[in-house]
Amino acid sequence: MTAGRTASPSHDHSTGQDQPGWIGEALAEHERLEIDTAGRRQLPLADREQQVLDRIDRARRRKPRVREERITMSHGSGGKATHTLIEAIFLDAFRNPLLEPLEDAAQLQVGGSRIALTTDSYVVSPLFFPGGDIGDLAVNGTVNDLSVAGATPLYLSAGFILEEGFPVADLNRVTESMRAAAAAAGVHVVTGDTKVVQKGKADGCYINTAGIGLIERDVNLGVAYAQAGDAIIVSGPIGDHGITIMLARGELDIEADICSDTAPLNGLVTGLLDAVPGVRAMRDATRGGVATILNEIAKAAGVGVLVSEDDIPVRAEVRGASELLGIDPMYVACEGRLVAVVPDEDAGAAIAALHAHRLGEQAAVIGHVRAEQPGIVQLKTAFGGTRIVDLLVGDPLPRIC
């Protein structure tokens, strides 16, 4: 409400319990049994909301099926289309107990050791952007997938698909970034591959990486382990990377002082696990952003999730650019942020450990896991209401990693 203005009685949204006499009785009846435009009686509002939630739950439980005849950009977005593609095609074809958790890295037993194995491909456009490039993005992304599995990253592979005509100077710039990023993360690139395709058959340079790490701690991490009452933590401001990439493409006349947050998270994770050995789960918030991770937690663990918009750290520049673009920062990719699920009694120790590291200085508890409304993520908005945070079908920012 604007200062100096008074709401008229027609805008009074008080409940029936707040009003005297017949007004209160009328409002109470209206709240209990609303009448639709056809004059038919409807269920009470709470029951109608539950019907919607039940329909969402039933839809999610249906066997996934790819309805499209051809692959679209949405299948690579990290949202609903990606999850459907993975579960209906890849998981169905390769199903085994090591793959089924669908975590960022597979956890393997080799001899007497536990190792984590991950792989990723990078097709970001443009190749060079404020705060990084495709080279350090590839190294950091692989290091982070190993780190959130509780592993110490050790060795990486690097496969390059180069387009005919790609400048050698740019390739040198990319490999130098990879070398520096690997040194900063304490890992080594130990094997690789190179392919060249005809001009027009690629987009300059694509990179595929795989990584191996050693799991030395007695930890079992996974979003399926989340329990009612657990705290949900994000390690810092969200959305920096995705908005940086969008603005770097130069398609929009928007200027903002935003840089990618691409960074290795292994040091941050080490500090967190030292302080809180009972961490339930960690994910790095890449494609699909924090919203996608929250939905993965709710689905895998069969729990509800409630987060507060006011508690989610977002830089003012990112929020402003997101509003201009019509994008919710909750769905925007990060490349140096993680989401952690910890027992509520350990939340203080977890936040203190994250704050002690430069990449976690703005870490915050953003919400909690709850038993109510399993499979549903809800956001308490800055205006006091709540809304469902569902998976997007596609991605408003394709090719951000």
Image (cartoon, rainbow, N blue to C red):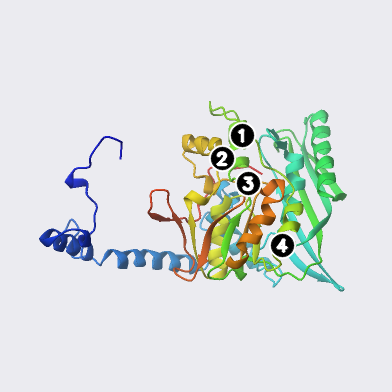
Helix, strand or loop at label 4? It is helix
Q: Is residue 142 above or below residue 132?
A: below
The mark nearer the N terminus, 2 or 3, is: 2
C-alpha distance separating marks 2 and 3: 13 Å
Q: Name the residue nearer the viewer: 256 or 55.
A: 256
Q: Which of marks 2 and 4 is nearer the N terminus?
A: 4
Q: Using the numbered discs, state the Cα–Cα distance from disc 2 to disc 1 in whole angstroms.
A: 9 Å
The three-letter code of the residue at mark 4 reads Ala
Frontmost residue, 127 versus 34: 34
Q: Going by the image, does 203 lie left or right of 32?
A: right
Give amino acid for label 3. Answer: Cys
Mark linked to residue 275: 4
Spatial CA span between label 1 and label 3: 12 Å
Residue tagged 2:
315
Residue 45 lies in what quarter of the image? Answer: bottom left
Mark 2 or 4: in front is: 4
Residue 383, above or below 307: above
Q: How many labels does the image show?
A: 4
Residue for badge 3: 334
* Mark toward the start of the polypeptide (4 vs 1): 1
Residue placed most toward the observer, 152 or 364: 364
Alpha carbon distance from label 4 to label 1? 31 Å
The residue depicted at 65 percent of the width and 61 percent of the height is: 349
Q: Which amino acid does label 1 sit on?
A: Ile
Tag 2 secondary structure = loop
Q: What residue type is labelled 2?
A: Arg
Secondary structure found at label 1: loop
Q: Looking at the picture, does residue 226 appear above or below residue 159?
A: below
Q: Distance between the residues labelled 3 and 4?
A: 24 Å
Nearest to viewer (mark 3 / mark 4)? 4
Image position of 257 (left or right of 128): left
Q: Quadrant of the C terminus?
A: top right
